[in-house]
Image (cartoon, rainbow, N blue to C red):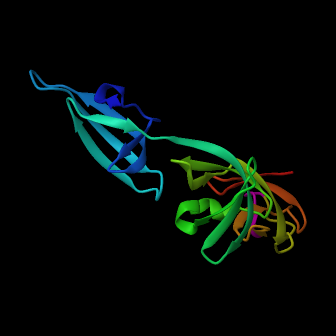
Amino acid sequence: MYVIAELKAGRAVVVDGEPFLITWNKFSKQGRQGGVMATKLKNLKNGNVIQKTFQGNDKLEPADVGYKKCQFLYSTGDAFTFMDLTSYDQFELNSDSVGEGAKFLVDGQEVDALVFAENPIGIQLPSTVNLKVIETPPGVKGDTAAGGTKFAELESGTKVSVPLFINEGDTVKVNTETGVYMERV
């Protein structure tokens, strides 16, 4: 059990039976009163952020969270199917659990599954992914002094702004956190 002095950003705790990640904390103490820890907590199941204050002798249970390697197999509607690479068991996550990462998933891609109490609750993509350009208009010569860009549809179905020299069939590196084109691979 964690006492409030041990609550730090980056720790996973259980609050009301749900796993939360502490994203911010501030300890304060006034006079003879006990200490108070103000925190911002991110729900690891649905991504909601809440603010919660813990008093002097409150204790929190550490969340049993971890990551395991898995492979994205396919999606059908709102369900995304993955396979655990150690046990070869398949599991499904809904679009709320996958979140914004769904825009960068391609069949056969390896990702890390966030696991709470032996049940997968989300995924973590690598910071960058290499995706093939499926469709983009041809680049127009001239007027590139301002660094012209155009939109390109990638094999995952998402669209990103790319430089004019990118053509269909090229592979580009995209930042999965910002969704921004980084370079041609």
Disc tally is 0
Q: Name the foreground residue: 133 vs 117.
A: 117
Q: Position of residue 114 (x, y in %)?
A: 58, 49
Q: Residue furthest top?
A: 32
Q: Write the residue at 71% across / 62% down.
A: 105
Q: Is residue 27 left or right of residue 78?
A: left
Magenta stretch encompasses residue 149: yes
Magenta stretch encompasses residue 75: no
Q: Is residue 5 above or below residue 122?
A: above
Rendering quarter of residue 89:
bottom right
Q: Is residue 92 above or below residue 110?
A: below
Q: Position of residue 9 (x, y in %)?
A: 43, 34
Q: Write the residue at 87% across / 73% down.
A: 138
Q: Write the residue at 47% across / 35% down.
A: 10
Q: Name the foreground residue: 64 vs 169.
A: 64
Q: Position of residue 153 (x, y in %)?
A: 76, 70
Rendering quarter of residue 150:
bottom right
Q: Residue furthest left?
A: 32
- Which portion, as a residue range, is magenta? 145-152
Say whether residue 160 is visible: yes
Q: Residue furthest bottom?
A: 77
Q: Position of residue 155 (x, y in %)?
A: 79, 68
Say whether residue 126 is visible: no
Q: Residue furthest right?
A: 169
Rendering quarter of residue 98:
bottom right
Q: Is residue 117 above or below residue 160?
A: above
Q: Is residue 167 left or right of residue 159?
A: right
Q: Name the foreground residue: 110 vs 28.
A: 110
Q: Name the foreground residue: 48 vs 45.
A: 45
Q: Write the residue at 89% across / 61% down.
A: 170
Quadrant, the N terminus = top left
